[in-house]
Image: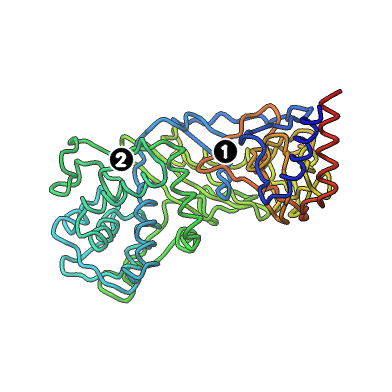
Amino acid sequence: MFKKLVQYVMVGLLAIAPVGGLLSAQTTKVAAASTPVSLPTTPQIDASAAIALDPATGQVLYEQNADQALPIASMTKMITAYIVLAQIKQGKLTWEQTVKPDDLIYQLSQNKDLTNVPLQADGQYTVKALFQAMMVASANDAAMMLANQVAGSQKDFVDLMRQKVADWGIQDAQLYSVSGLNNEFLGAEVYPDSPADAENEMSAADVALIAQKLLADYPEILETTKQAHFTFGAQTSDETAMSTWNLMLPGENNAPQDYVVDGLKTGTTDKAGDCFTGTATKDGQRILTVVMHANGEDTGRRFIETNKLMQYVFDGWEQKQLAQANQSLAPYKTATVKYGRQKTVQLITNKAISMWVPKGTTAANIDWHYQAVKGGAKRQLEAPIKKNMQIGQVTPQLNGVTTRYIGQAPQSQLRTKTADPKANLFVLIGEGIKEFFTNLF
């Protein structure tokens, strides 16, 4: 017995060494709420696919067939816009640079059955004018000219597009053109070895991710997409009044009354039908929607279905702050500390935590998903403990609902509020002796 007592005293002595940290493997845990949340009545969206989300976090608020790859038409131009804006940010392109159409693009611009801006064969057009024409009037020839200026050819720009969406984790994209046009209109610029009638395809969830990235990295895009009318080639022989295809903008035929739409991109082909990626704000809260191949006889059908979706979110949901920065969360207020001067250390959030919730949601409807970084699911730490040391990550969840996120789900850190150094030698020896007799009896 004496030998075993010595062993426990040695445990106390060894605790003086500067080790500390993780006592068990990383695990996850959910602190369950007591009351399932009550969801608002979901609308029936008359379209092949639809999705609504919070663009800031990617939290999905509605989805319908959102993972099936479908033709996306001119919503493609959001990818083109992203790459152009990235080139400008990197200094590889400027708004004032001029671009001349090649023969194929000039011939395409004369096709009255397609959406284009009027071009002269020997004309010079600024990047800014072409970008505006692409994003407001959905001009296919403008998109193709920008692609040539950036990459040197349509094929090489499509390769850039493919790489970009792959970098974002999109696996099911089929991309063949920079504009969204079907191959039948592209002549010699058809992507090598692609089917004669190939057309860009992605899922609604993937289109939403592209729009989310565009808004996050280049929010200035909204200064362009909120324009309902502009003049292309002002004070030149090409001067032409152009109008948006987004009829939900203020003052247009399908403009809503109680929220404001300021983007983002329409799309239409025979295969894709009428599509629309929209974004809107109300009371300072922004949402993002995608509607693909809207049905119905009304010419504004994509906007009618989008309005159903946006109204559903704004009427039934709200963004709510669930915790303030430096606040303790009820299920995870403390961690235990072995060999410390204190038995526990308080845990606090590193930032405010918000989430879109159905209106009327209370704290009883929120679960907290905890992922351990140190100390395992039971949060058992070993001194010394530093102030602001990350112990775990938390994500709120609605009770009874599987919350989906487009992109990476947001996580907030739980950190120690104060430091806790190791206890002195006599306390550690005492702890060792106490542990010995506890295990003995």
**Residue for point 27% across, 62% down:** 150
Q: Nearer the viewer, mark 1 or mark 2?
A: 1
Q: What is the crowding at mark 2: few (fewer than 14 residues within 10 Å), some, or many (at least 20)?
A: many
Query: In the orientation shown, which residue stands out farthest toward the bottom?
Result: 235
Question: Mark 1 vs mark 2: which is more N-terminal?
Answer: 1
CA separation, marks 1 and 2? 24 Å
Residue ranking furthest to the front: 2
Q: Residue at 16% of width from left, 61% of height from top?
A: 102
Answer with left or right where residue 207 lies relative to residue 357.
Answer: left
Residue 124 falls left or right of residue 131: left
* Image label count: 2
Q: Quadrant of the C terminus?
A: top right
Q: Position of residue 17 (x, y in %)?
A: 69, 50
Amino acid type, mark 2: Asn
| 173 relative position to 312: left or right | left
Residue 434, quarter of picture: top right
Q: Nearest the camera: 374 or 236?
A: 374
Q: Quadrant of the N terminus?
A: top right
Q: Is residue 225 visible?
A: yes
Res. 204 image quadrant:
top left
In the rendering, at what x and y percent does residue 313 appear? 63, 40
Q: Is label 1 in a helix, a strand or a loop? A: strand
Tell me the residue that label 1 is attached to: 60
Q: From the viewer's perspective, is 196 left or right of 385?
A: left
Label 2: state its secondary structure. Answer: loop
Q: Which mark is residue 200?
A: 2
Q: Position of residue 275 (x, y in %)?
A: 42, 41
Between 391 and 117, the one lying in front of the other is 391
The percent coordinates of residue 423 (x first, y second) are: 81, 50
Q: 367 or 345: which is nearer to us? A: 345
Q: Considering depth in this image, is 196 or 396 the residue closer to the camera?
A: 396
